[in-house]
Image: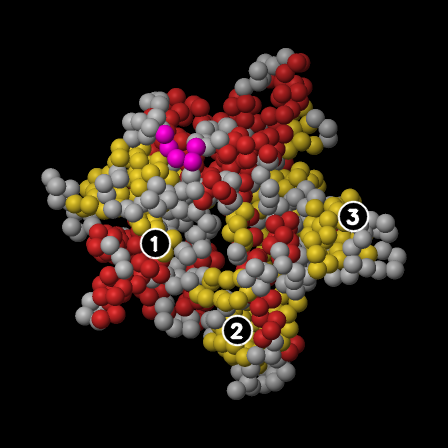
Amino acid sequence: MVDREQVEEFVCARKFDSMTTKELSKHLGLTKDDQDELVGILEELQLQGHVVRIKGHHWVSPLNNGMLVGRLDCNQGGFGFVCPLQGDIDDVYVAEEDLGPAMHNDLVVLEYHRSRKKGRRDRGPAGRIVKVLVHENETIVGSFMPGKKFSWVAPDEPRLFRDIYIAKGDECGAEAGQKVVVRVTSWPTLHRNPEGEVVRILGKEGEPGVDVQSVIVQFGLPQEFPEDVKKAAAQIPEDPSEHDKWRRLSQTKYTTVTIDPEDAKDYDDALSLYRDVNSGNRVALVHIADCSHFIEPDGILDMEARDRGCSVYLASDVVPMLPERQSRDVLSLIEGKERLAKTVALEYDDDGELLDYSVFHSVVEVDERMTYTEVQQILDALDDEDNPASASVLAKVPDDVVDLIQDLDHLAKQLRERRTQVGSVDLDVPEYDVSVNEKGEVISVTQIVRDPSHGLVEELMLAANCAVADFCKSKKLPALYRVHNEPEKEDLMEFSEFVMTVVGESIDARDRKQLQRLLTQVSDTPLREAVNMQLLRSMQRAQYDTTSDPHYALNFEDYCHFTSPVRRYPDLVIHQILDQHLREDRAPGELRAQWKKKLSGIATHCNERQYRADEAEREIVKIKLLRYLQDHLHEVFDGVITGVEEFGLFVRLQEYSLEGLVRVDDMKDDFYKLDPKHKALVGSRTNKTYQLGQSLSVVLDRIDMTRREADFLIHDD
């Protein structure tokens, strides 16, 4: 057999330049019979960006030959950027004429050919796509438009900026305006649009279920579970047996609650707290549903969960990582039923300092299933016990549950204060809950309030994740860590300039305490969303990695995701590794050898799946908001300017968090020019200024559901 690590080490070395398959085989001491396996390994390495095949069986180092492998991120304006998979390289600009057959999100090989300049200013590298490794848009969802000679489909994804031509006879009976799925049969060129055939009709625009199905197809989300996966899930026992509970520590004597949203799809975490009779210290117990007890590594359920990567929540619908019936019941911590769990016991002194922790397999029984609303009502009642209404609220809940909620809240506030002291940066980016009826119609839009009930759960989950990350690192176990790299200096400098422009203060964005003070200062002002969003844009995306590096925003040295194994695959991996170490008594060295070959690939895959889920969840919320606001055309809304460009102002509605465009062509009172230094549009005659972060009243002028865009007009009082 070919040693994959040996091949990877050789082709990733700096001195490697280029070789044929035959030359590589000879250098590595392989036989002719090994060449097919060698090619398979090289093709895997090509998909990771380590090597590129050119001219048949000639393999080259991309970085040593003016190339790179990356993901194409297109703009609806017709150009794109390739984001490299390897190397410390900036994204590379690709003009429309250099895209070749590539489309948005394809995995491509790019060749550098020039620097992109604007005047005398170097605007970074540019290149052309020479090869598409993976076409990610073999099927596309969009709106069908009939024509005389041929028809076409306008893609829902605006970054797929070219319509797909449909030849006569390939319409599958589609009618004007219907949402359809197209299979691409011919990829685009500079002078020719992609071509395809309609393979599925989803229904008329706005019909029940069509929006969700459109997003599922658009983002390539899985739908039905395969039959073998369903059968494997059905074999999970409804209740744990005595054998299942063997060697586990029972935690059923402690009052235990779950706290979730009203519409929670699963219940994978629960909380308890008690005073240790010997030390007098508080011990918080974070119980997590022990999914890995039933899902072994590389089994049928595990492979399906790995492929899905995470659950995706689409308004009232969910695309689950694991079969839904089991997720809601046997793999959840259900009120009144004994369930298997892993428990993180966190011992704190009265000042909230963590003294010790332990991680163990347990049996738990939830006493009360609670919602955030119910918990907040209890906390409010405890803060105002003299109010007769408070007594009524507290009387509905058992005393031990009220005491537990009070103790957990007190501890959570101490933990949050400690995070603040060490420089944890909590962004306050508004989130919205979109409620829909059975027809998929939006019936309400409400902002999710991050009140103390949410903080109670969040702080304990953060603490448990840190403890498990520290456990894995100290025991030298393989693990997937959640890392958040420090922002680039240039991005922080740009953010500092932004703050000076819109807030009028000079700050050092590298100083966490200054960032905290800034966020607190703007928290109750119209600038809140603009400042938080701009800071978010300045930061890098959090990623899964096999190496523990600090989490910048939280300012944790070691951090992982452990608390949601029902809906996140990286959490499930951590649970599986803990099983092998704690229950099977397997040594860290043995486990590192077992997981080494696949853990890096899992991290990359889960990063991609999480990004896809985030995009899909944002898209369905945007669609539902646009449909909801179609009944509010020409009404006036309060907004905040979130972007300033030569062509207009991007404005986000404060009530709905929907962003739309005020086109400069519609600003009739003056001729406006961009002032890039002050991030503003300035009237040349009146000197009237519209600046980033400024509050603004706008009229909802137009909604384009095909392009999923809203246009606003400035409302003159």
Give the residue number, with chain letter if any, for mark 3.
197
Q: Nearer the viewer, mark 1 or mark 3?
A: 1
| Mark 3 nearby-residue class (10 Å; few <14, some 14–19, many ≥20) | many
Q: Rounded to the nearest whole Å, what is the CA distance between mark 2 and mark 1?
A: 47 Å
Quadrant in the picture for residue 77 = bottom right
For the point 61% across and 50% down, the residue is: 216
Question: Is 571 within the magenta?
Answer: no
**Which amino acid, by three-letter code, is at mark 2?**
Ala
Question: Is 238 within the magenta?
Answer: yes
Horizontal and vertical percent position of residue 198: 77, 49
Q: Identify the disc placed on residue 680.
A: 2
For the point 64% across and 24% down, the residue is: 39
Q: Are marks 2 and 3 in contact (CB under 8 Å)?
A: no
Horizontal and vertical percent position of residue 476: 34, 29
Give the residue number, with chain letter if any, for mark 1.
370
Q: Nearer the viewer, mark 2 or mark 1?
A: 1
Of 341 and 539, which appears nearest the observer?
A: 341
Secondary element at image label 2 = strand
Of 30 and 221, which appears nearest the observer?
A: 221
Q: Is residue 308 above or below residue 191?
A: above
Q: Rounded to the nearest whole Å, what is the CA distance between mark 2 and mark 3?
A: 46 Å
| Mark 2 nearby-residue class (10 Å; few <14, some 14–19, many ≥20) | many
Classify residue 435 as left or right of residue 506.
right
Residue farthest toward the right in the current orientation of the protein = 149
Horizontal and vertical percent position of residue 7: 56, 23
Q: Mark 3 or mark 1, which is nearer the start of the sequence?
A: 3
**Which amino acid, by three-letter code, is at mark 1?**
Met
Q: Identify the disc placed on residue 571.
A: none
Q: Rounded to the nearest whole Å, what is the CA distance between mark 1 and mark 3?
A: 50 Å
Question: In the rendered structure, which segment of residues is drawn in magenta?
Answer: 237-241
Q: Nearer the viewer, mark 2 or mark 3?
A: 3
